Amino acid sequence: MTKDLPEPDTGAQFTRACAENDHKVHLLRQMVRIRRFEERCVELYSRSAIRGFLHLGIGEEACAVGVLEALLPEDAVVATYREHGHVLARGVSMRATMAELEGKVEGCSRGRGGSMHLFDAATRFYGGNAIVGGGLPLAVGLALADHLQGRPRVTACFFGDGAVAEGEFHESMNLAALWHLPVLFCCENNLYAMGTALELTESETDLSLKASSYRMPSWEVDGMDVIAVEDAARHAAEVVRTGGGPHFLELRTYRFRAHSMYDSDRYRDKAEIEGWKSRDPIPALVERLRASGVLADGDLERLEAEVDAEVDDAVAFAEAGTDEAVEDLERFVTSEPVQRLASP
């Protein structure tokens, strides 16, 4: 009697496995790109090459990468002021992003937006927004336009847990649900609205439960697991795109650094920060890829070297960029007086 042997892998199965492995390495590369970019921003800010406000997303890379991998080029993205990772994951070049942070004309917003107002129409990235919750009504407007025109698109809207306490969050959720709009609401819940803990501002801290009160599918996701985020976002986006109405994802994540470069970060317990760092999404994915044999010895080092070279190139590009000419400062600014309606 012969022993039963497993059926040999087919060519299609092998190809699929290779594609899946390549995709996981791509996810890793995207997160490393964002991490290295943010770390270089700290250096540049310290020597005043970057000025103004600067909010870093170190620790939250899995949210940006996972969600944006689930979107299509024709979809729209609206983000927050902590949006460097979102814009890089969306496909805006690191050169244009770094040049924008340094206020150069070659930046994606001609140097006029800076860190909090990255924008790129070509990739349908409709901006970071310095106002907490300010992107929510913009996303509803974009989705309404697609809905009225019958376009099978998704508008992904990122915002933090602090935005849930704002009136426009509830207004936007209500209208999106009422009008059955194609919006994917992505709440990056990092537990703190600036320096205020979530439990001090919300009587109900389960934000997915709060969102479900608007009669839309809502669920929480491990925001430190890029594969889990992508799976959840891909499922939600497919349903939204095919007429399923708005969906809400609560991405439970954590920022390893302070709220901004001006923040002394005295409101968080150090043990809490270290506990979340033990769940760092990048080492977690590296461990999984090594355990499954996808990453061999030296692969990570080569990937990191390639990313470091990209960051170096972006910094060199920005530092060689063009400052806005003084005579052009009034370009793109409305100077005509507002015509008031005559009184009856």
Image: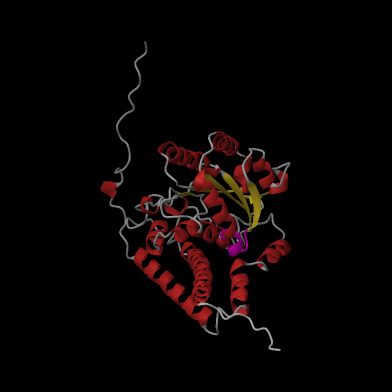
Q: Position of residue 279 (x, y in %)?
A: 66, 67
Above or below, 208 relative to 26: above
Q: Position of residue 91 (x, y in %)?
A: 42, 60
The C terminus, quarter of image: top left
Is residue 226 shown in magenta? yes
Question: The magenta stretch spans which residues?
Answer: 223-230
Colour setup of the view? secondary structure
Above or below, 296 relative to 237: below
147 or 127: nearer the eye? 147
Q: Position of residue 12 (x, y in %)?
A: 49, 73
The residue drawn where x is 68% and y is 88% is 2
Tell whether 10 sits left or right of 327: right
Q: Residue furthest front?
A: 1
Q: Position of residue 242 (x, y in %)?
A: 50, 46
Quarter of image, res 284: bottom right
The N terminus, quarter of image: bottom right
- Magenta stretch, main secondary structure class: helix
Report if residue 99 is visible in the image.
yes
